[in-house]
Amino acid sequence: MPQNIYDDPGFFDGYSRLPRSLHGLHGAPEWEAVRAMLPELRGAHILDLGCGFGAFDRWAAEQGAQQVIGIDLSERMLRRARELAQHPAVEFRIGDMARLDIAERDFDLVYSALAFHYVEDFPGLCRTIRSKLRDAGRLVATVEHPIFSAPRHDEWLERDGRPVWPLDSYLEEGLRTRNWFADGVIKYHRTIGTYVNALVDNGFRLTRLIEWGPDARQIDEHPEWARERDRPPFLLFAAEAIS
């Protein structure tokens, strides 16, 4: 069974205080870059994997999506999502994206934000996603950047008066256990090459790959983000389903 850390009360409480939890998409610094990768949503059928509080789902419905199904493993996350969602096009369901069991197919878009790194079998997930997309349908997703996920001990070090990210074990893919709002959070590290090749090998054409870090304007507004230029936190990608 997959770990369901988001239903842990301590973890959920900490996660709920993050800017992206409090302010939705506008609290996610990478959102503008993600938004630029999205296809036209008017009339679209969308599947959101790891939907969390449903911020994207509500926004997609406001853009004119015809159907938005959000899937999440956490009852607590979905309870909050349902409280916030007030649109008839949006539906939330409990489910495990790694063992996706929904009847619907031919989605125009599968979307996922910072969830795929909780899945052990990424190639298998890619095959499942492809089976749910129509030909030329799109996948747009974000994950923790592999430079962020690789180290065995993920804490900044101090060298010559400046912070240094301790990159190691980059090519040693697999399980990483983190202490983040709760002890023993399980995630999976994989390289950029593994992400790309899993997509290519399972029916996708990569159309965009972004190693996201804050730009000068964002650093002016949030000086504490400057060190993210040394260690990009997120990897963003868009892919098209091919026949």
Image (cartoon, helix red, strand yellow):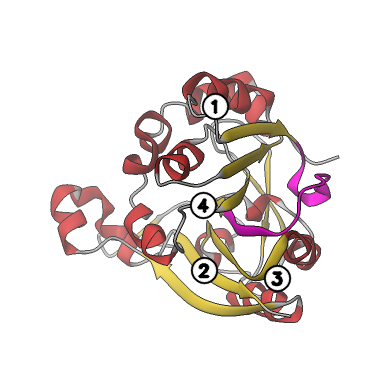
* Residue type pointed to by label 4: Gly
Mark 4 falls on what kind of element?
A: loop
Mark found first going from the N terminus, 4 or 2: 4
Mark found first going from the N terminus, 1 or 2: 1
Question: Label 1 belongs to which residue?
Answer: 81
| Circle 1/circle 2 CB separation < 8 Å | no
Q: Nearer the viewer, mark 1 or mark 2?
A: 1
Question: Label 3 belongs to which residue?
Answer: 172
Q: Nearer the viewer, mark 1 or mark 4?
A: 4
Percent x, y of residue 75 = 68, 24
The N terminus sits in image quarter: top right
Mark found first going from the N terminus, 3 or 1: 1
Q: Which residue is at 52% across, 68% downward?
A: 237
Question: Label 4 belongs to which residue?
Answer: 43
Question: Label 1: how many residues lie within 10 Å, few (<14), some (14-19) or many (20+)?
Answer: many
| Circle 3/circle 2 CB separation < 8 Å | no
Closer-to-camera residue (82/119): 82
Mark found first going from the N terminus, 1 or 4: 4
Q: Which residues are drawn in magenta?
A: 95-111
* Residue type pointed to by label 3: Glu
Q: Nearer the viewer, mark 4 or mark 2?
A: 4
Residue 166 visible in the displayed image: no
Vertically, is 27 above or below 237?
A: above
The C terminus sits in image quarter: bottom right
